[in-house]
Image (cartoon, helix red, strand yellow):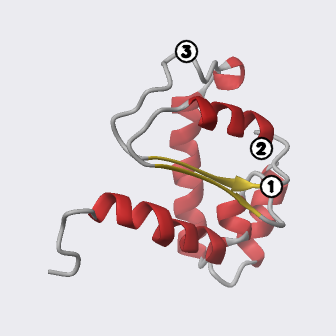
Amino acid sequence: MKKVIVGSLWLSPLYSLGRVKAYFKGQDLSESVTEGTGGFDDFADGTRFEMPFFVFQGERDVITPATRAREFFDAVEAPVKAFELIGDASHFAALHRPERFLELLLQHVRPAVTAGRNVGA
């Protein structure tokens, strides 16, 4: 998996060496926080959220299959929620298709977090 990530980052014109370094620093933190989550039960902490809930993932994700993510998404109750599959991408959809990921953030997340606020003021 690291080979896929390193290749994607190294060859992407969107990532400078500094951004690649920052990515791996973040991964080190994530690994220490998420250790032992292989058997994680998504439903254990409940499915009711008082905040917006979004799932944007690659349609060919084999680590978290879309059917499993959709099953959890459908069970979630949230004031605003959206589920979108990113075509021609797998688990690291935000890295492989950053333009589509940004579109989804702007389309779904930005309106949810800026509702009622004067953006740009």
Q: Secondary structure at mark 3?
A: loop
Instruction: Report the front residue among 40 and 75.
Output: 75
Instruction: Report the front residue among 29 and 66.
Output: 66
Query: Residue tagged by mark 3?
Result: 44
102 to the left or right of 60: left
Mark 2 and mark 1 in contact (Cβ < 8 Å)?
Answer: yes
Q: Secondary structure at mark 2?
A: helix
Query: Residue tagged by mark 2?
Result: 66
Query: Residue tagged by mark 1?
Result: 59
Give the residue displayed 71% in from the left and 61% down from the top: 93
Badge 3 density bin: few <14, some 14–19, many ≥20, Cα 10 Å: few
At which x and y percent is residue 9? 71, 69
Three-letter amino acid code of the residue under disc 2: Ala
Give the residue displayed 77% in from the left and 44% down from the top: 66
Residue 73, by quadrant, is: top right
110 in relation to 14, above or below: above
Q: CA distance from mark 1 to mark 3?
A: 25 Å
Three-letter amino acid code of the residue under disc 3: Ala
Instruction: Report the front residue among 89 and 21.
Output: 89
Which image quarter holds the C terminus? bottom left
- Ranked by sequence position, the earlier of labels 1 and 3 is 3
At which x and y percent is residue 63? 80, 40
Q: CA distance from mark 1 to mark 2?
A: 6 Å
